[in-house]
Amino acid sequence: MKKMILLVSMLAGVMTFSGCVDDKESASVTAVREAKAAQLSALAALSNAQAANQQALADTENALREAKVAYETAKAAYQQALADKANSEAQAAAAIAQRQMAAAQNEIQRLANELEEMAIQHKIAMLDLQTQYETALKKADDDSQALLGGLYMAYQTAATKLLDAQQNIARQKINLAKLQAGLVDSEEAKQLMINKENRKIASAEQTIAEWKAKLEVFEAQKAPEEAKAELVTEKAALSQLAQDKAKALEAVEKAGKEMNDAWSDIDDQKYRGLAMDVTRGKYGIFIDEEGHPTGEAFGDFIYLQDDEKNALGKPVEATVNTYWFMTTDDKGNTTYTAVMNRMIQKNVTKTETTAPGVESTNTYEAYPTYYYQLNAEGVKAYIAAIKANVEKNEGKALEDAQKALAAEQKVVADLEKAEIKDEVAIEEAKSMLPGLQTNVNTAQAALDKANAQVAAIQAAFDTMAAEAANWTATVEAYNAASEAYCDAQFVCEKAEDAYGLQNAKVCALEAVVRGNVIVDGVNMTFDQAIESAERQIANAIDTISAAKREIANIEIAEADQLKALAIERLEAEIAIAEAEIPALEKIVADTKAALDAATAAQAE
């Protein structure tokens, strides 16, 4: 991430330039040459920054692929270990695999955070470079401004569409990985799908508003000179909106960093580390004096579960967001007991009308954080259940060893009290005593070791209880930072929509001044552009209708189908989106080639 930010900063730095001209040239010729050199420099910086962002996206995707492989590998090991729960070594392997799964999950979430930060950084850099390019273009003559301005906007629009598509694919792949890695429960999967459809509706409504703004200009059929005069006013308004957009992006960046800092505070909490230890099986393996797992299984340990369902059905006392354990008595009665709530902070949403004239809503979500909360009575029952296992196993083993030793000691005593002593029998009986004493010592050591492990588990829960208030305050601070981030995102979206709407009007006026319209790199007459605009509006209306139908279908889907449905839809949408990338890349290449050629010709 730091490399990406540094690279964009360096690219922005290449915007500084100086004209290399003949001293005998007139001031006007010098000005033209410098303006065109500035255009070339700005265009190169824009192109390089686009390439840098594409590489950063590729790096993120590679890292995500590695994290997914790590998770799937650990998950397979975990499931294999669970298949033989009677084997203590298998239980130890399950605990290790579970911790590896958690590490992979954390990496996936880190990549999600980094992707959002990268997207914001790129938008800020692009806006700055665009402003510098437009400033350089203002120094050129009117003909150059009209020609290059239109070609530049066509290229910038195409490049933005491509990058938005690439970033959207990256987000979808991360969401898919989070679903597959168990970072999202059924209710969240449902909200994830609904939010996605709501964003489609918002985007389509913004598209309708922008095309309607262009249509209004095209259908007015103003003379070029009249459009040029109006363009001055509209560009000034666009410049102000660009500043508003830049400020909003910076506010999002700041809020995002503050939210990530708040998450780091959560990560640093002793409570969270202990919660992960007790829920992910650390104590299923004996630990050394320094608290590190030795690799030797603690057979009496009871692994906490958080499954939505198990072989016996969904626990009555334990819900999906609860860590629980199960016990079965001698009569076959099963009891489920909640030890710790796995309360998930639901996504913070903000829904309002966006840009003026755009009847749309947007939903933004903060990253959910797991909020572990102790159930005091459940903890007591859990420790008691493990102690009962120790008593049943190590305690019984010690009792049996002691009884065997006592029985043999009585044999020796009885033989020695006999009137006629059988020395051979006495010696034989005595020879059994050291081995039986060793058995007692071994059983006592095993019991002491098991009791020490139970004490360590108790100490972990006791420390968590002592840290609970601080933990709650830290989580609340994170939640507040998450909501502030959502607020900043919403303000930024409104600023971007307002800018997009005004930019559509400016582009339409520039087309009138030039005498032609450029849509996706294709030159059109105004009649063709009007037909294209009407098609785009009709397509956007269809998109809105389809999204609303999808939301209705999602609302009635069964809870146990939601995860599978979300995964299925994401996989399909990723495949469709990736198939569209080559066409978007071609439009970018074509519009850039046209701009390069025109800029080079102007620079001659």
Image: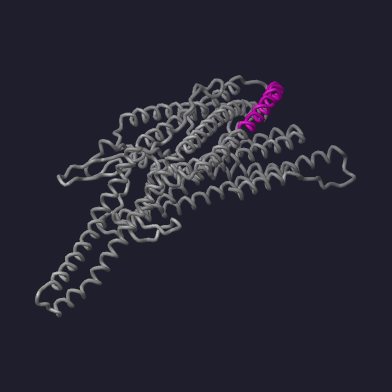
Q: Is residue 450 left or right of residue 112?
A: left
Point out the image quarter for the C terminus: top right
Q: Position of residue 63 (x, y in %)?
A: 49, 52
Q: Which of 180 and 284 is in front in this view?
A: 284
Q: Give the range drawn in magenta.
A: 224-248
Q: Which residue is found at the position 67% from the left and 35% from the top?
A: 149
Q: In this view, does 329 lie to the left or right of 75?
A: left
Q: Which of 225 and 186 is in front in this view?
A: 186
Vertical position of residue 480 compared to residue 67: above or below:
above
Q: Which residue is found at the position 68% from the left and 48% from the top?
A: 10
Main secondary-structure element of the magenta-colored stretch: helix
**In this view, which residue lies farthest toward the front?**
419
Q: Is residue 152 magenta?
A: no
**In this view, which residue lies farthest toward the left?**
420
Visible in this render: residue 44? no
Q: In this view, does 112 lie to the left or right of 382?
A: right
Q: Which residue is found at the position 37% from the left and 29% from the top?
A: 551
Q: Which of 481 and 211 is in front in this view?
A: 481
Residue 559: quadrant of the picture: top left
Q: Where is residue 447 in the image (x, y as percent from the top left)?
A: 30, 58
Vertical position of residue 209 compared to residue 442: above or below:
above
Q: Which of 561 and 483 is in front in this view?
A: 483
Q: Position of residue 470 (x, y in %)?
A: 49, 37
The colouring scheme, among rainbow, by chain, secondary structure or one colour, is one colour
Visible in this render: residue 384? yes
Residue 133: quadrant of the picture: top right
Q: Which residue is found at the position 40% from the left and 26% from the top?
A: 545
Q: Does the magenta stretch include residue 226?
A: yes
**In this view, which residue lies farthest toward the right?**
24
Vertical position of residue 203 compared to residue 437: above or below:
above
